[in-house]
Amino acid sequence: MSGFVEAAQAAEAALRELFPPTPLLRNDHLSERFGADIWLKREDLSPVRSYKIRGAFSAMRKRLEAHPESRHFVCASAGNHAQGVAFACRHFGMRGTIFMPVTTPQQKIMKTRSFGGEMVEIRLVGDIFDQSLAAAQGFCAEEGAHFLSPFDDADVIEGQASVAVEMLAQLGRAPDMVILPVGGGGLSAGVTRYLRETGAARALRYVEPAGGASLQAALAAGAPVTLSGLDSFVDGASVARIGGLTFAELRDVDPAHLLIAPENRICVTMLEMLNVEGIVLEPAGALSVDVLPNLADQVAGRTVVCVTSGGNFDFERLPEVKERAMRHQGTKKYLMLRLPQRPGALRDFLETLGPEDDIARFEYLKKTARNFGTVLIGIETARPENFETLFARIAATGFTFTDITDDDVIAGFVI
């Protein structure tokens, strides 16, 4: 048995001080849909509603064993690692300073405060995780505190590998396939190494959000690189640069086994899991389930484990999730309509709508021209094919319009 396997098993055993193993549950809905035996490793049901408590607790435990004089721990996090560190700080009675992006959902900030209590101070710095990370590391140097990396740390990776320890014990055998979300790489690196070193790595698939595909970039370059742009919607997995230690475990991943999940499609998956299964997943937590349609021919007839990595979802974001989901499904569009400034023009336009079409937004953007005005119109419909007939009716009536639904520049200003 390798040293890493022993360390991961020790981490899993130590975690029992805090919580029992997270459930591994067969999902009948997904199993029937894909003709497979699909199980969810429910990390969204940990005490902090994500797997991050594993690495945070394990790294703090090992630090205190080696350096019992340690009293102050610091981390940077978009939310889930912060909650794990806060929970561990209160458990061990240690002082914690947590740096989080200003854009972190309020739900994650409030829960971090709740888990840490008086032991933890939260500092909101930067717009993205990497800016918070730089601030946290600078603070550590000034204060002489110990930095707890969210992913790029050997002890953290060992702690995250405890997911695999539990999964194998609960299933009683190695699954045919494991689907892992990737952010900074701590979870995917830990689980991958454990499965490989125990001979249980049958097939592994990885998934990143389209707006934060740092592993894809690293595989292409042969080393970690910093992404030039980052979409922070999938805040639990949007990292501009994968860790060096984590990439060392993932550098041999076949690029064909890495899937990219569009942010709007993830929203469809989140709503499906909520409405059909009653499971609340945050965007990062839905990644492994989201790519099942891409793997339909590979999972059919096989035993598959999807790691649902987190459920810290702020329901104030639900309208945005619904909006993104409808746009991905093609059931909502935004038009810039050139409306004649004459009596009855609006009525004429409304008569082009079909029985399943509904106006969700109507706003004059410009009314300086004498004969025409520009109107922003949001239209929802029951089926995407309805737009083809609607657009034909609008054109036949003589109105001119521009579909700006997928124009990120214009939509960013007016939607």
Image: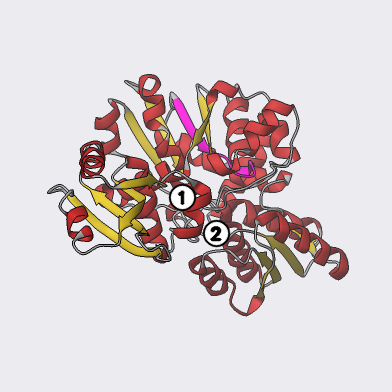
For this orientation, the residue located farthest to the bottom is 118
The reply to whether the magenta stretch includes residue 184 is yes
| Label located before the other in sequence (2 or 1) | 2
For the question of whether residue 265 can be seen, the reply is: yes
Residue at the image position 21 percent from the left and 64 percent from the top: 343
Q: Where is residue 291? Give x, y as percent.
A: 42, 33
For this orientation, the residue located farthest to the front is 370
Hey, what amino acid is under mark 1? Pro
Disc 1, SS: loop
Task: Read off the residue under disc 2.
Answer: 17
Could you tell whether 207 is left or right of 313 in the image? right
| Above or below, comparing residue 135 to residue 23 in the picture | below
Task: Read off the residue under disc 1.
Answer: 283
Specify the segment rendered in magenta: 177-186
Disc 2, SS: loop
Single out the mark in the foreground, 2 or 1. Answer: 1
Residue at the image position 52 percent from the left and 72 percent from the top: 110
For the question of whether residue 174 can be seen, the reply is: no
| Above or below, comparing residue 342 to residue 44 in the picture | below
Q: Where is residue 179? Give x, y as percent.
A: 48, 33
Q: Nearer the viewer, residue 290 or 190?
A: 290
For the residues bearing labels 2 and 1, Cβ distance under 8 angstroms:
no
Total numbered badges shown on the rendered structure:
2
Q: Nearer the viewer, residue 156 or 70?
A: 156
| Above or below, comparing residue 142 to residue 10 in the picture | below
Q: Quick one: quadrant of the N terminus?
A: top right
Q: Where is residue 122? Give x, y as percent.
A: 65, 72
Task: Name the quadrant containing residue 109.
Answer: bottom right
Could you tell whether 391 is left or right of 46 in the image? left
Q: Nearer the viewer, residue 400 or 272?
A: 400
Hey, what amino acid is under mark 2? Glu
Report, in whole angstroms, how far the alpha carbon at label 2 lies from the one at label 1.
29 Å
